[in-house]
Image (tube, rainbow, N blue to C red):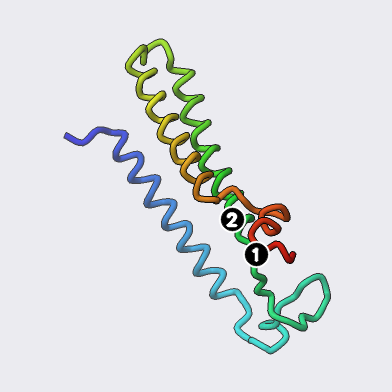
Amino acid sequence: MIPDSFYQILIYTVITVALIGVLLLAAWWLGAKRSSAGKKSPYESGIIPTTSARLAWPVPFYLIAIFFIIFDVESAFIFAWAVAWEPLGVTGLIQITVFIVILAAGLVWLWLKGGLDWGPSSLRSRNPHV
């Protein structure tokens, strides 16, 4: 027996997909069909581009982004655990401790591998002529 809530979700999904299809079809049908070199050129605040927009971002930029994501997710799990402290009890405490120890071990490993060494001081230590 299928619950009534399933039918409600199915009807909602069908209506949503149909609405998206109608909107996409209307945009295609009503949209301009002509193309020109001006439409295909990039536009940046009225300045005509002279070079490629591809820039090489330094690796530390990506490291900071990855660290933020990792520790942001970690804090979300720890806050969720703190909210549910009473029902989880000692078992939850052991599990969150194992979780934090694994993340701390990963951070120590990254530190020992030199993943946190970047910036002017790390460049000087690797290449004394800088």
What amino acid is at disc 2?
Answer: Tyr
Residue 11: x %, y % from top left: 36, 45
Residue displayed at 73% across by 66% down = 129
Specify the amino acid type for callout 1. Answer: Trp
Q: Secondary structure at mark 2?
A: helix
Q: Looking at the image, do the residues carrying marks 1 and 2 touch, with CB atoms under 8 Å apart?
A: yes
| Residue located at (47% from left, 25% from top) | 80
Measured as percent of width and height from the top left, residue 2 is found at 21, 36
Q: Is residue 65 above or below residue 5?
A: below
- Quick one: label 1, few (<14), some, or many (20+) residues within 10 Å? few
Residue 128: percent from the left, percent from the top? 71, 62
The numbered dot on residue 93 is none
Indicate which disc residue 57 carries.
1
Tell me the crowding category of disc 2: few under 14, some 14 to 19, or many 20 or more residues within 10 angstroms, Cα based.
Answer: few
Of all residues, the one furthest to the bottom in this rendering is 37
Instruction: Name the residue rendered at 71%, 78% in the picture.
Output: 42
Of the residues under marks 1 and 2, which one precedes in the sequence?
1
> Farthest residue in the left direction?
1
Quadrant of the image containing the C terminus = bottom right
Which type of secondary structure does the marked residue at label 1 adopt?
A: loop
**Residue indicated by mark 2:** 62
**On the picture, is 24 further left or further right than 102?**
right
Position above or below: 106 against 77: below
Left or right of 85 in this view: 117: right
User: In 3D space, how far apart are the residues under numbered discs 1 and 2 (Cα atoms)?
Assistant: 8 Å
Residue nearest the viewer, comparing 24 with 74: 74
